[in-house]
Image (cartoon, rainbow, N blue to C red):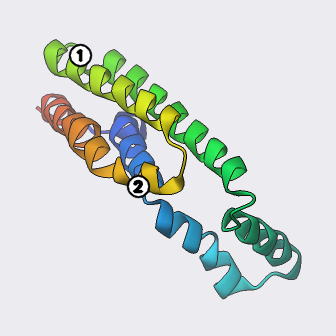
């Protein structure tokens, strides 16, 4: 049996969320592909304004709260997908991932700077992404047999 995009969703969401922890790259390289490659006048003007605000200390709190909301929402989706798809593979590992993910949500909600988010990236990777990948790997092997 072939793996589908739907099968890849839990691990894909983990990887996309993990990218959000690299806040330095997010802030410094925000939409650089569009700005440097295409230089669309209308779009570039709006993106430059967002990028300027994103890196402004006066506007940091606004963007920080939005960034935290996206990370928390993604982790919530990861919890949902992992519990629905992988419980039959290894319920104890699923419980541990859910516990770790909930702890990450609590930590994310308490951060007050982008730099504090960046510090949490290794913990997210080791406690959520890699265990989800391990379950995905087990799941994909069982699907392909």
Looking at the picture, tell me which residue is in the foreground, 71 or 138: 71
Question: Viewed as shown, does residue 54 lie left or right of 93?
Answer: right
Quarter of the image holding residue 106?
A: top left
SS under mark 2 = helix
Can you give x and y, in whole percent of width and height, for residue 61 in the image?
68, 49
Looking at the picture, tell me which residue is in the foreground, 36 or 55: 55
Q: Residue at x 49, y 34 (%)?
A: 110
Q: Residue at x 21, y 43 (%)?
A: 126
Q: Nearer the viewer, mark 2 or mark 1?
A: 2
- How crowded pointer 1 is (Cα within 10 Å; few <14, some 14-19, many 20+) is rated as some
Question: Viewed as shown, does residue 57 lie left or right of 124?
Answer: right
Q: Residue at x 35, y 52 (%)?
A: 119
Which residue bears the numbered disc 2? Answer: 118
SS under mark 1 = helix
Question: Viewed as shown, does residue 88 lie left or right of 59?
Answer: left
Which residue bears the numbered disc 1? Answer: 95
Can you give x and y, in whole percent of width and height, for residue 72 in the image?
51, 33
Can you give x and y, in whole percent of width and height, for residue 31 in the image?
64, 71
Asked if one can make out residue 18 in the rendered structure from this viewpoint, the answer is yes
Q: Is residue 51 above or below residue 23?
A: below
> Where, quadrant-wise, is the C terminus in this rendering?
top left
Question: Viewed as shown, does residue 137 lie left or right of 44?
Answer: left
Q: CA distance from mark 2 to mark 1?
A: 25 Å
Q: Residue at x 13, y 32 (%)?
A: 138
Q: Is residue 130 above or below residue 27?
A: above
- How crowded pointer 2 is (Cα within 10 Å; few <14, some 14-19, many 20+) is rated as some
- Residue 25: mark: none
């Amino acid at each position: 049996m072939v793996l589908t995009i739907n099968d890849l969703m839990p691990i894909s969401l983990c990887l996309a969320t993990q990218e959000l922890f690299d806040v330095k790259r997010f802030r410094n390289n925000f939409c650089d592909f569009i700005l440097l490659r295409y230089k669309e006048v209308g779009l570039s003007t709006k993106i430059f304004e967002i990028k300027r605000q994103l890196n402004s200390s006066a506007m940091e709190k606004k963007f920080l709260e939005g960034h935290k909301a996206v990370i928390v929402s993604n982790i919530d989706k990861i919890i949902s997908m992992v519990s629905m798809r992988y419980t039959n593979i290894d319920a104890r590992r699923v419980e541990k991932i859910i516990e770790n993910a909930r702890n990450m949500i609590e930590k994310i909600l308490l951060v007050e700077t982008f730099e504090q988010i960046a510090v949490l990236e290794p913990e997210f990777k080791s406690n959520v992404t890699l265990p989800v990948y391990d379950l995905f790997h087990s799941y994909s092997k069982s699907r392909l047999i």
